[in-house]
Image (cartoon, rainbow, N blue to C red):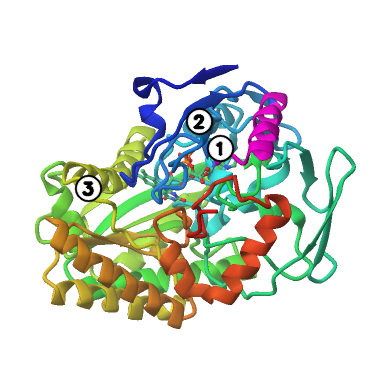
Amino acid sequence: MIIKTSPDEIQNYLLDSSNFKGFCDAVYFPENEQDISEILKEAFRKNIAVTISGNGTGLTGARVPRGGIVISTEKLNRIIELNREQLYAVVEPGVLLFEFQEKVKEQNLMYPPDPTEKNCYLGGTVATNASGEKTFKYGPTRNYVVEMDIVLPDGDLLKLKRGSVIADGYKLSIKTEADRIINIDLPDYKMPATKNAAGYYCKKDMDAIDLFIGSEGTLGVISKIKLKLIPLPEKLISCVVFFKKEINALNFIAKARDISINTRLRLDPRCIEALALEYFDERTLKFLHDDKPLIPSAAKAGVWFEQEVTMENEDTFFEEWMNLINEFHGDEESAWFAVTEDDKKKIQEFRHSISEKINEYIAKNNLKKLGTDAAVPDDKFEELYYYCKKLVEEEKLNFVIYGHAGNSHIHLNMLPKNEEEYNTGVNIYREICKKAIVLGGTISAEHGIGKLKTDYFLLMYGQDTIDKMIGLKKIFDPDMILGRGNIFNIIT
Ligand SMILES: Cc1cc2nc3c(=O)[nH]c(=O)nc-3n(C[C@H](O)[C@H](O)[C@H](O)COP(=O)(O)OP(=O)(O)OC[C@H]3O[C@@H](n4cnc5c(N)ncnc54)[C@H](O)[C@@H]3O)c2cc1C
């Protein structure tokens, strides 16, 4: 097993896409579960902090070490099995998402979880319960994990299969491969009924596998994953439509969301059902205009939608979407309709370029990212949206708002010019988190808490509940060596 210690060789493991920076003594590159287990056994014995590293595309500093050692999963990069007939794949955690999606597509299958950044590892996406454009229809990564191997902080191996270890109310009992029984009293906090990536997944009668999905590298190293796949849709309508009034775009989204959810619930294939429903405000469009001159200058907002279709129903659905666009005065002339695969890729690239450009701006100004990740119940979406806008406009901060509006989940990214503006932005961020909580939502719908959002996480659940979560972690990791500083702002 390779171990790197020289500053030049380890510097890439000391930051992530949030631009938060850290330090460590060494980076380990295990090649199998046995290697992981040995590293952890020694660290556990010596009380050495261990941070697990995926590909560092996270936006919360979660893979950034604050001392101790790093376990990189990059050598664990095999697709072990891809079963076309039974619709599953078995992978190691260091497989790149975009490479996996391509391999799956070659088999005429699809793996729906698709964070906008596809350069992440599958292990990273499971550890953060990542979601993306298609989450509106298909849900987050959690819905696709059917089996998992996890090396626990003391080096013991746990194999979990969805449906095989279920809590009895709030009592969960797990058996490791060394026949050790771990009994857990699950905390009984209530998670928001929105898309959510904040803290441990705990629920009455829950499946044990769900506790580890989204646990942000704090409960164990995910060393093998079995993922569910679905048949590749025959065709896709993909379109970005621009609006001359913001309110029209928001109303378009609200109606498209309602129809889509009703279609899904009634399982009626005759009505439109968006796969993705993404929003871009005027400032986002202006921010990108130099790079994407086809964005109409008069646009006050844009919406990207996708819909799965077949050869037979393509025209009907196209017509239905056009009717909806016209109802809300979307600009048909300037809309981008993807006809070819290349067009679809260009739209995806447009979407990706927003987050990428923001991250570049933040890195260039040597600041940390100030992008909210709040989601609220659908009937509260506009309230949150206007609240966010008002706060930043009052403070005259530069900002952009965009995101997964189908899931009532938006990113307000502040673009401070200096430290003073950054500090103002931090206060605004806090107020937005409070508002999302009051509205029954979450402070993090997809990025997780990491090291940068622990204060807001405290606002969401309060100290008593956080203490219960820490108690849960300590059952596996009494000295809190793993993912130290993630989710909980305590250093032991
Ligand atoms: C431009 C851009 C757009 C993005 N868009 C989205 C989006 O739409 N949706 C979304 O959900 N996210 C998005 N992200 C965030 C990021 O891509 C996801 O969080 C991704 O899942 C992180 O994967 P990674 O491999 O880079 O993990 P890292 O950043 O390396 O690590 C993330 C966390 O996972 C833990 N971890 C990694 N591997 C393992 C493992 N094998 N076992 C246990 N813990 C592990 C780490 O310790 C850390 O806590 C975006 C990021 C960027 C830069």
Q: Which residue is denoted by mark 1 in the rendering?
A: 122
The span picked out in magenta is 33-51
Query: The residue under label 2 is which amino acid type?
Result: Leu
- At x 76%, y 55%, the residue is 208
**Mark 3: C-beta under 8 Å from nearest atom of ligand 1:** no
Q: Say which quadrant the N terminus sits in.
A: top right
Q: Measure the alpha-carbon separation of dots 1 and 2.
A: 6 Å
- At x 55%, y 50%, the residue is 216
| Mark 1, other Cα within 10 Å: few <14 / some 14–19 / many ≥20 | many
Q: Is residue 398 left or right of 462 when viewed as pictured?
A: left
Q: Which mark is residue 362?
A: 3
- At x 38%, y 79%, the residue is 435
Q: Using the rendered view, name the quadrant where residue 139 is placed.
A: bottom right
Q: Secondary structure at mark 3?
A: helix
**Mark 1: C-beta under 8 Å from nearest atom of ligand 1:** yes
Residue 224 visible in rendering: no
Q: Which mark is residue 96?
A: 2
Mark 2–mark 3 contact, CB under 8 Å? no
Mark 1–mark 2 contact, CB under 8 Å? yes
Query: The residue under label 1 is which amino acid type?
Result: Leu
Q: Is residue 218 left or right of 397 when viewed as pictured?
A: right
Query: The residue under label 3 is which amino acid type?
Result: Ile
Q: Using the rendered view, name the quadrant where residue 269 is placed.
A: bottom right
From the image, state whether disc 1 or disc 3 is nearer to you: 3
425 relative to 67, above or below: below
